[in-house]
Each structure stands twice: as structure tokens, then as C-alpha cells.
């Protein structure tokens, strides 16, 4: 029908109820499907960049020794 998915990856942002949640990396099968949908023009968005940002946010709140 021509719909396109606007994709995002979960980011635990401050000030939100899920601020303390830890994102789980996508498995290989999910990554392949997202890439397939993207290359077919069925999906667009910054999900790859969001994954990087999520990892950085989690790293920032890790205890420093």
C-alpha cells in the first residue's frame, strides 16, 4: 500500500520514565531485516545513530572507578 516506517532505536533519555532502562542491542536477524526494509525503501530513519547514542548514554551513567 506504499507505507514507509520511520525507524528509531530506544534511547533512555533523562526526564522520561524509562531514563534508567538499559537498551538491548539488536540481534543479527533484526539488523538484517531493518537493513532490507531500508534498502527496499520501506523504512527510513536514524536507527543506527540512535543505537550509538543509546550506548553512549548508558556509558555516561556507569560508575567511574
Image (cartoon, grey):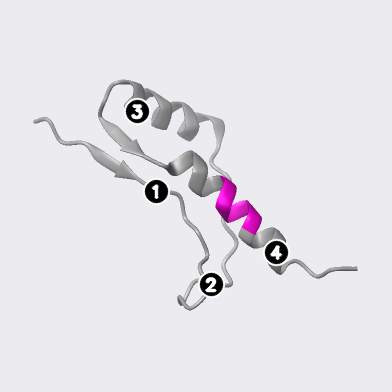
Position above or below: 8 against 34: below
Q: Residue at x 32, y 36 (%)?
A: 44
Q: Secondary structure at mark 3?
A: helix
Residue range in magenta is: 52-56
Percent coordinates x, y for residue 13 in the rendering = 50, 68
Q: Residue furthest right?
A: 65
Find disc 3 in the rendering and name its residue: 38
Find disc 2 in the rendering and name its residue: 19
Find disc 1 in the rendering and name its residue: 8
Q: Earlier in the sequence, mark 3 or mark 2?
A: 2
Q: Secondary structure at mark 1?
A: loop
Q: Residue at x 15, y 36 (%)?
A: 3
Callout count? 4
Find disc 4 in the rendering and name its residue: 60
Describe residue 16's horizontal placement relative to residue 51 as left or right: left
Q: Which dot, 2 or 4, sits closer to the camera? A: 4
* Location of the C terminus (image quadrant): bottom right
Position above or below: 24 against 48: below
**Secondary structure mostly taken by the magenta-highlighted segment of the chain:** helix
Q: Earlier in the sequence, mark 1 or mark 4?
A: 1
Amino acid at each position: 500500500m506504499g507505507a514507509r516506517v520511520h525507524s528509531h532505536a530506544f534511547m533512555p533519555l533523562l526526564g522520561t520514565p524509562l531514563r534508567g532502562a538499559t537498551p538491548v542491542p539488536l540481534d543479527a536477524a533484526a539488523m538484517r531485516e531493518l537493513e532490507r526494509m531500508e534498502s527496499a525503501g520501506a523504512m527510513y530513519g536514524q536507527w543506527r545513530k540512535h543505537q550509538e547514542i543509546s550506548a553512549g548514554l548508558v556509558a555516561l551513567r556507569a560508575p567511574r572507578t
